[in-house]
Image (spheres, helix red, strand yellow):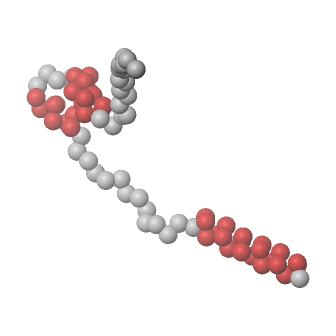
Amino acid sequence: MWIVRSRQLLLALGIAGTMAACSLAPQYAKPATNSPSGAYKEAGDWKAAQARAEMQPARASYFPTITALAGARRAAI
């Protein structure tokens, strides 16, 4: 009896392992994006470092913000 159950368990694990290795999702295609630094090339004497410096405030919104507040109150009982 336990041999039948162990065979069923091995069969179920084998099927689950095979299904876990399969991917039915379509192949990922990276979307095409326009680089904002390309617009600076037409502006004249802009350099890559200046273009990156212009992009830093926009990229800063992707990172978490840490804030701290402190306060004190004194009350008479």
Marks counted in the figure total 0
Left or right placement of residue 44 versus residue 61 in this view: left
Where in the figure is residue 49, as x and y percent of width and height? Answer: 26, 22
Residue at the farthest left position: 43
Q: Is residue 37 left or right of residue 14?
A: left
Q: Quadrant of the N terminus?
A: bottom right
| Residue 20 occupies quadrant | bottom right
The residue sitting at 31% across, 53% down in the picture is 31
**Relative to 44, 72 lies left or right:** right
Say which residue appears at 43% left-offset and 62% top-offset: 27
Up-down: is 19 above or below 74? below
Q: Residue 71 vs residue 50: left or right?
A: right
The answer to which image quadrant residue 39 occupies is: top left
Residue at horizontal 16%, vertical 31%? Answer: 40
Quadrant housing residue 26: bottom left
Q: Nearer the viewer, residue 9 or 28?
A: 9
Q: Position of residue 61 (x, y in %)?
A: 29, 35
Please state the horizontal and vertical placement of residue 72, each as a whole percent of the image.
37, 18
Quarter occupied by the C terminus: top left
| Residue 48 visible (yes or no) | no
Q: Nearer the viewer, residue 61 or 15?
A: 61
Residue 30 location in percent, x, y? 36, 53
Rendered position, 30 above or below 39: below
- Above or below, 59 against 2 in this view is above
Residue 31 appears anywhere in the view? yes
Q: Is residue 58 above or below residue 10?
A: above
